[in-house]
Amino acid sequence: MAELKEFAVLHARGQGMAARDVRRILAKVGNDEPGHPDSWTAVWRRAGDAERDRHRPLRACRAYAMARFPYAGDPFRAAAQDDCVRAFDAWRRAGTGIERLELDLPGGGLAAWASGLDTGRPLLVVLGGIVSVKEQWAPLLARLSAFGLAGVVTELPGVGEHRRRYLPASGRMLSDLLDRLAGRADVADTSVLAPSFGGHLALRTAAHDPRVRRVLTVGPPVAGFFTDRAWRARLPELTTRTFTHLAGTDPFAAPGWALTPAELAAVRVPVAAVLSGRDEIIPAADAVLLRRNLPDARFRVFDDVHGSPGHVTEMRLWLLHTMQRMRGAGGPATEALGLALAARRLVRPRRFAAAPPDDRPDGPPRAEPLPALAAASRGR
């Protein structure tokens, strides 16, 4: 329960939920017993039902996403997952321009949300990690036309509506997706925004698929996460349980997960990565591997835990602004991102707390959180 509540902050706040609302809901959670009225899923699902009844489907979607967190491993979480998709579908039908895709790919199908297809625009693919469903990121699609992009948001294998197992060979998934979207977008000019495990998959794809022209990620596992037994023993149980559920077996026993220096060196396209100085999921040695082997990389380091939940706004602004600069795209939207990022940096960002008291900043991060991460960001 302690881990659920701790990691819920990152994912609830990442969806735009106010800290006070997250704190209020978490205070009602008494256990994680499937079917219990005070259980994690029951409490969050009631919060979603209340938002649905107030005709606020996007807020309902966010609560349902938390109700199925970290994965739909029992019938109650599976029902919450279905509620999450239905609530987002209700929201996107109200003039957002977002369409639903159900695609047959080699090895199985997946569902996705998309916007701006059939316009000839370059493509942005958004792909989350092992615990985040596509509905968490899909509201971004309603704004992509201002950046001159088409967009598709989907999920890692095993997450949400993506029913396939998550295996080392899943690195082919993005290429299969681009094959399927050819003709509906300019897939030869694809950007991939993929935090955490999605970033691992995106880097592996970029090493061999020239259609991926840039990668933007947050705290991706690289090698040590998969191979360092001492580090693995320190991982949160939530992480290991979720990873095992997606793989269907002990994923650490499977060879081929780690990205090699040669694979990283083959990523000849620009990479932008947010790193967290107190990351409890990804070892600092993985950041060093990125710095040493990626030919063209930019790093932003926050004094925070995995995913930098205390810096969500600045992190997103930096990633989107960096993507536009990588693309050489100017215009009002890019200028607005730059101004918003500059303004945000004038604010003293909040240090992470598992239950932040409110939405106001209360302290600056250290300039160099960890030697390895500071070295990773120096001069890049």
Image: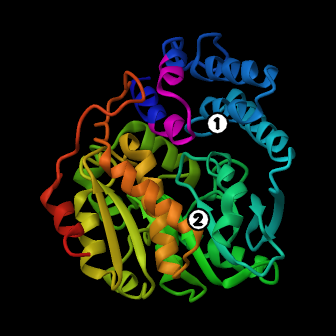
Counting the numbered discs, the total is: 2
User: Element type at marker 1?
Assistant: helix
73 or 82, nearer to the observer: 82
Residue 240 falls in image quadrant: top left
Residues shaded magenta: 10-23
User: Element type at marker 2?
Assistant: helix
Q: Is residue 35 left or right of residue 69?
A: right
The residue depicted at 41 percent of the width and 88 percent of the height is 266
Tell me the colour scheme of the image.
Answer: rainbow
The residue depicted at 47 percent of the width and 84 percent of the height is 207
Q: Is residue 199 visible?
A: no
Give the percent coordinates (x, y) of residue 6. Answer: 40, 30
Q: Which mark is residue 304?
A: none
38 or 320, nearer to the observer: 320
Q: Is residue 213 visible?
A: yes
94 up-or-down from 359: above or below: below
Residue 297 falls in image quadrant: bottom left
Give the percent coordinates (x, y) of residue 241. Answer: 48, 41
200 or 307, nearer to the observer: 307
The residue depicted at 43 percent of the width and 69 percent of the height is 255
Give the percent coordinates (x, y) of residue 57. Answer: 77, 33
Residue 269 falls in image quadrant: bottom left
Q: Is residue 314 left or right of residue 290?
A: right
Is disc 1 surrounded by few (<14), some (14 to 19) or many (20+) residues within 10 Å? many
Q: Which mark is residue 333?
A: 2
Amino acid residing under circle 2: Ala
The residue depicted at 38 percent of the width and 65 percent of the height is 273
Q: Which mark is residue 65?
A: 1
20 up-or-down from 210: above or below: above
Q: Quadrant of the C terminus?
A: bottom left
